[in-house]
Amino acid sequence: MPLELRLAAVIHLLSSSALRGATFHKTEALRAHLRCVADEDGLNPYLRSTLQEVLGGWEAVHCHPASVPVDCYPLAAPGCQTH
């Protein structure tokens, strides 16, 4: 898969997890994409380091295999401000 599509998948999975919660399958997919992107040849060393750091954080996340996304109101929503 091209690097651009993998990065798009990472961004989409991070956004979905932030808005609707992490699930087992989203977390597994995110880890797989992060690993592949971090292993890309010729990647900027700062980007590689950031990806590896992010991957380390997601490696520590454990979701139940039957977990499902939830419809909840995030702390910040369009048109809503929290202080």
Image (cartoon, rainbow, N blue to C red):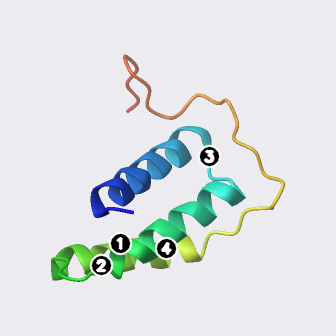
Quickly name the residue at label 3: 21
Q: Residue furthest right?
A: 66
Disc 1 is placed on an element classified as helix
Of the residues shown, which amino acid type is indicated by label 1?
Val
User: Label 2 near label 1: C-beta < 8 Å?
Assistant: yes
Q: Quadrant of residue 73?
A: top right
User: Percent x, y for residue 60?
Assistant: 59, 76
Q: CA distance from mark 2 to mark 4?
A: 20 Å
Quickly name the residue at label 4: 57
Estimate how packed mark 2 is, as few (under 14), some (14 to 19) or many (20 or more) residues with alpha carbons within 10 Å.
Answer: few
Q: Which mark is residue 40?
A: 2
Disc 4 is placed on an element classified as helix
Q: Nearer the viewer, mark 1 or mark 4?
A: 1
Of the residues shown, which amino acid type is indicated by label 2?
Glu
Of the residues shown, which amino acid type is indicated by label 3?
Gly
Estimate how packed mark 1 is, as few (under 14), some (14 to 19) or many (20 or more) residues with alpha carbons within 10 Å.
Answer: many
Q: Quadrant of residue 77?
A: top left
- Height in image: 77 above or below 5? above
Question: Mark 1 vs mark 3: which is more N-terminal?
Answer: 3
